[in-house]
Image (cartoon, rainbow, N blue to C red):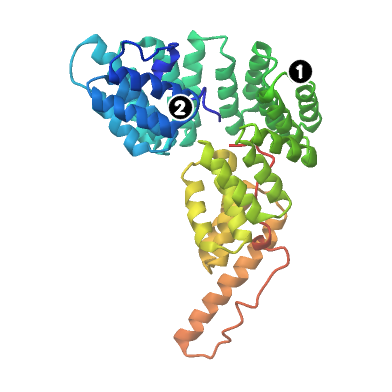
Amino acid sequence: MKLRHKILPLTLCVAMSISGCGLSSANQNYSKALAAYNKNDFTKAQDYFIKAIEANADKAEYHIDYGFTLLAMKEYDKAREQFRIVILDKNIPMVSENNKKAYRGIGISYLCDENYEMAIQNFDAALEIKELDSLNTDIMYYKASAFEKSGDNESAIKIYTSILESNPKDDQIYSARANQYRISKDYENCIADYDKAITLNPNEFDYYVGKFAALKENNKNAEATAVLEQAAALKISNEDDKYELAKVHFYQGNYELAMNELTQSIEAGYTEGYYFIGEINLMNRDYQTALDNFNRYLEDNNGASAMLYNQMLTCYLQLKDYDQAKKYLAKAKKYSDPGVKTQLLKNEIIYLEHMGQFEEALDLMEKYMKACPEDTDAQKDFYFLKTRTDALASQGESENSGEPTNPGEASDTTVSGSSKDTPTTGTTIVKP
């Protein structure tokens, strides 16, 4: 899911048109730091924040806003250091407000750093502080995102429901909850929430794409196609809209047009487009280029997910780079995403097979067949793995009895259509 909004230092919510005239050295550098941050020049912002802190290390806002700058630079440990400097054990309203901002920042840093347990702990610490209750909805949203990323869809849904009780016209929350219902395969509630989101904000492309994915997964293909046609007919007013339309064309299967539009959007700064270009590369079996684009996407976006890592795992399996495949298998499994569970399970079977771990692969294949009984190729894969494990068992018995064996017997056994030839990508699912 997308974050609710761009992560900003809270002080940037207040317009600051400060000139250097009559200000202290610390404030002059602080105002320059904020200006640089607003221009996404984080390196320059960092330089000015450091100068401001050197001139006055007691200003909490300097440390908090510097922490968010470090977040933008993906310096998560250093960001947490700045936030922790602010936290004081004093029962003073201003101190409590700063503590709340700092715990929020620490939580977001752990969320970006994929440590969801620590993210939730710090969001809870922020919510326990009664001051600045105007921040509570924002913090709850990030907390729900942490549950979502960790695969705890039920907890995420509960938080979104709680937010909607006090914000019944928040279209983004309806969309976020709809996505969790989709992952949980509760398509009735999912579609209802997307419909509410569209009613509240009929010009938001993502809501149509989310509804499309739910209908597609529920085998309502005609309705899914109609929803994309609705999205494609929306008015195009700016670069945001052009990028969103490119995604719609991607989901419509118009890959050549989508590729051209996505390339233009990337040039305009929409680096999320690298993900979709990577998907197109993957479908075209250009695995190395797909990896290059997935990695470019990760450089500029906090978009790590089981889906993305499964796609990268697929590429590494096809490129026979099993060291990297092992790494990305572990990354994907970390998310416990039910929406990618069966795809990931099949790719894990393929990896184990290539590693010669046939017994482990056979155990997982039995689980896969129970989860996906409609996959007729799985039966062939099962017999292939059973042949391998039986051959190895027979070889072991022969060695123990002293009987001669044929060392090449197991390795020469193959079954047409084995799972090792068909890594699973899941490209019909909505992006991470």
What residue did someone put label 2 on?
155
Residue situated in front as seen by the camera: 105 or 348: 105
The x, y position of residue 325, in whole percent, is: 53, 57
From what the image shows, is residue 88 above or below residue 78?
above
Looking at the image, residue 373 sits to the left or right of residue 334; the answer is right
What is the quadrant of the C terminus in the image?
Answer: top right
Q: Position of residue 388 (x, y in %)?
A: 59, 72
Q: Residue at x 42, y 26 (%)?
A: 143
Residue at left 28%, top 33%?
Answer: 81
Does residue 402 lie above or below 221 as drawn? below
Q: Name the image quarter holding residue 416.
A: bottom right
Left or right, 402 with reference to 213: left
**Toward the viewer: 101 or 330?**
101
Callout 1 environment at 10 Å: few (<14), some (14 to 19), or many (20+)? few
> The residue under label 1 is which amino acid type?
Lys
Which is more N-terminal, label 1 or label 2? Answer: 2
Label 1: element kind:
loop
Q: Quadrant of residue 62?
A: top left
The percent position of residue 203, horizontal first and vertical second, equals 70, 17
